[in-house]
Image (cartoon, rainbow, N blue to C red):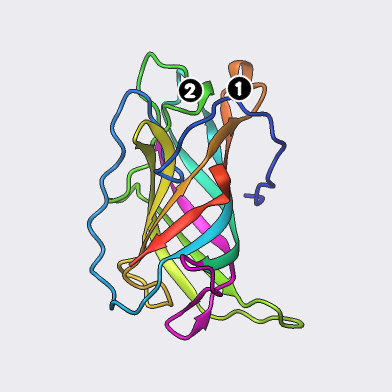
Amino acid sequence: MKTPRLFGNRAVAVLTVTCAAALLCVSSAPAFPRAPAAPSQTPKTLYNSMFQLSFDPPLSHTHRTTDIVAVAALTNGVTATGGPAVVNGKNVFSGAVTDASGKASIPSGVDMCTGLTVTIPGTGPDAGRATVIWQPANRQNPSPDGQDQFTFALGLLDGRPAAIANFTGSTGPYSGYRSVNSGVAITNPDCASTGLLKWLGVAVGGTSLFTP
């Protein structure tokens, strides 16, 4: 499948998302197993973020569960105190999410075109799974500076859609971390006639929070 490109900013729903890639007005957000605590010296970090899910076949009243392909970008990483994002000796200024997969679903009798009723489980065979490749800042011709594998869920957190990522099984810089990516949900404009093809999340205030 061709990797989707991020599409335009036509907001269908603004979600105070504290659950970054999870939406569901009528259900609770997927639960994540608690990540083991990282050493106290490991910092919290913040990123600007944008992520897009594509559904094949489109989610509709006849297709309530479908496969996903996702792309995401994390940029301008800093620690919570404003310093450069360096975690476990790795310069993790920005990251590109690749190889994202999983299954999304919607409940019956709901409007999937708001983007608020889509969920992806955080555990099990249908969980969202992906890899993020980290890049350093301020280098000519930068090369990757580590990568992390993670699982993720899409649902509601405090009534807002968000994606929650769990790095428990990773061996990269963020091993043991958890991230909350919150934002605004934007769906394809022709959703009512074609079904839900794309779901774009743009972080409210430009923030994805990584915590040990």
- Main SS, magenta region, reads strand
- Foreground: 195 or 204? 204
Q: What percent of the width, then of the height, locates residue 21? A: 46, 44
Splitting the image into 4 quarters, where does residue 83 fall? Answer: bottom right
Disc number for residue 112: 2
User: Dot 2: few (<14), some (14–19), or many (≥20) neighbours within 10 Å?
Assistant: many
- Foreground: 168 or 195? 168
The question of residue 36 being in magenta is answered with: no
Determine whether label 1 and label 2 are within 8 Å by CB.
yes
The structure residue drawn at horizontal position 59% and vertical position 30%, both measured from the top left corner, is 187
The structure residue drawn at horizontal position 29% and vertical position 76%, both measured from the top left corner, is 40
Disc number for residue 191: 1
Disc number for residue 11: none
* Amino acid bearing label 1: Cys
Q: Is residue 4 above or below residue 78?
A: above
Q: Is residue 95 above or below residue 11?
A: below
Q: Is residue 60 visible?
A: yes
- Foreground: 61 or 209? 209
User: Dot 1: few (<14), some (14–19), or many (≥20) neighbours within 10 Å?
Assistant: some
Say which quadrant the C terminus sits in: bottom left
Q: What percent of the width, then of the height, locates residue 86? A: 50, 78
* Amino acid bearing label 2: Met
What's drawn in magenta, residue-wise? 79-104
User: Among all residues in the image, which is located at the extreme front?
Assistant: 81
Q: Secondary structure at mark 2?
A: helix
